[in-house]
């Protein structure tokens, strides 16, 4: 039952599967792995990873060895890779749980030598993780390298010159380093075309409905539906303010509803007086500051009563829309989703 929760978070697993198949189609026969780090971008590691396995995914990427251990318990036969690399002093964890480290430095390569297979990341322009191209010649021969990889920095920006440069730099590395599979494209990179695909796609955000091509219509579907509960309705008869700081003035004749969702639930404070929720098909603006456990919305002229649910995220207001209002990205919206919602998995 969800009557005692402030919000109902529904996640449609069939849409995540459909998004995966859409990405496979875009890769046109190249293999498609999946990124399920950060609790599958906030949507739940266990249900999401099982769903993607059922859809045909076999190679999984997470950020941390702890995430890899958790995923190994969920998917005993999955091919699990750790993007964060080889954590100092933890090599036995990787071998015990059959986790493949993405080696990001010559030091990590040396620490891992004579163990099982590994990946190697080359830094082609992100300047975050990876071996500099000038150091490729120092990589010892005889390593069992599964995935040779790099990561786009600006693939979501149309025709960015750095993306072209990264493709060229990575293509050179592919010729220099012996490996089994080459992987460059993230979600946005998949939509840059065949020259970015190499052997293995590595999508993350697009699986969960975030637009990988923000310069055009989103090719992915949104699997997330978040409804907040109305816990009080105010008929305003005199001028007054609402919320902390008295930042918004109400006038006689307005109607205000208070929703049991706040920044403790991942509804960012930066959405104050900027975002929109939906009462059915009617847009209702968030007014006043977002507080820890509540937001106020203007429902003047609308049918709205205590106990009713409104769409905080849904078909009319996607995670990307909330991100736009908050001045952030959809990734932060999803990974901030709180634990006080009642979660329901569909599909």
Image (cartoon, rainbow, N blue to C red):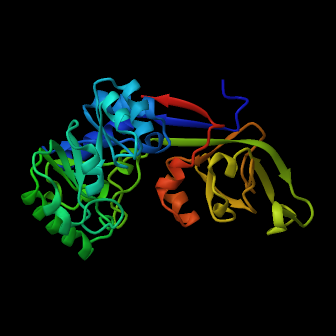
| Residue sitting at x 40%, y 24% | 73
Q: Residue at x 32, y 38 (%)?
A: 18
> Relative to 119, does residue 79 appear above or below in the rendering?
above
Quadrant in the picture for residue 164: bottom left
Question: As drawn, is 145 to the left or to the right of 252?
Answer: left
Residue closest to the eye, 145 or 25: 145
Does residue 152 appear to the left or right of 3 in the view shown? left
In this picture, residue 167 sits left or right of residue 91: left
Residue ID at (69%, 46%): 261
Can residue 251 be seen here? yes
Residue positioned most to the left: 175
Q: Is residue 97 visible?
A: no
User: Which residue is at 29% across, 59% downward?
Assistant: 130
The answer to whether residue 144 is above or below residue 244 is: above
> Could you say which is closer to the camera, residue 118 or residue 112?
112
Q: Nearer the viewer, residue 76 or 119?
A: 119
């Amino acid at each position: 039952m969800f009557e005692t929760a402030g919000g109902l978070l529904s996640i449609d697993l069939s849409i995540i599967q459909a998004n995966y198949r859409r990405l496979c189609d875009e890769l046109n026969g190249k293999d498609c792995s999946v990124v399920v780090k950060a609790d599958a971008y906030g949507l739940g590691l266990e249900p999401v990873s099982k769903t993607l396995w059922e859809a045909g995914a076999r190679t999984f990427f997470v950020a941390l060895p702890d995430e890899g251990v958790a995923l190994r318990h969920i998917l005993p036969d999955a091919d699990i890779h750790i993007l964060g690399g080889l954590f100092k002093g933890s090599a036995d964890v990787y071998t015990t749980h059959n986790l493949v480290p993405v080696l990001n430095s010559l030091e990590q390569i040396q620490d891992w030598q004579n163990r099982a297979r590994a990946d190697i990341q080359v830094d082609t322009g992100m300047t975050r993780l990876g071996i500099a191209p000038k150091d490729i010649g120092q990589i010892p021969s005889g390593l069992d390298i599964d995935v040779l990889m790099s990561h786009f920095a600006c693939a979501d920006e149309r025709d960015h010159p750095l993306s072209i440069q990264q493709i060229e730099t990575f293509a050179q590395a592919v010729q220099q380093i012996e490996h089994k599979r080459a992987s460059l494209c993230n979600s946005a990179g998949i939509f840059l075309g065949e020259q970015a695909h190499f052997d293995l796609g590595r999508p993350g955000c697009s699986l969960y409905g975030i637009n990988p091509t923000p310069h055009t219509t989103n090719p992915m579907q949104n699997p997330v539906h978040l409804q907040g509960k109305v816990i009080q309705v105010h008929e305003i008869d005199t001028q007054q303010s609402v919320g902390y700081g008295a930042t918004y003035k109400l006038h006689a004749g307005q109607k205000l509803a208070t929703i049991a969702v706040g920044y403790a639930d991942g509804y960012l404070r930066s959405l104050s007086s900027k975002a929109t929720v939906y009462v059915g098909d009617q847009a209702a603006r968030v007014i006043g500051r977002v507080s820890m456990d509540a937001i106020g919305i203007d429902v003047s002229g609308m049918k709205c009563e205590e106990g009713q649910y409104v769409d905080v995220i849904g078909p009319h207001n996607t995670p990307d829309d909330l991100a736009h209002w908050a001045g952030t990205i959809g990734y932060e919206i999803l990974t901030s989703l709180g634990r006080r919602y009642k979660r329901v998995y569909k599909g």
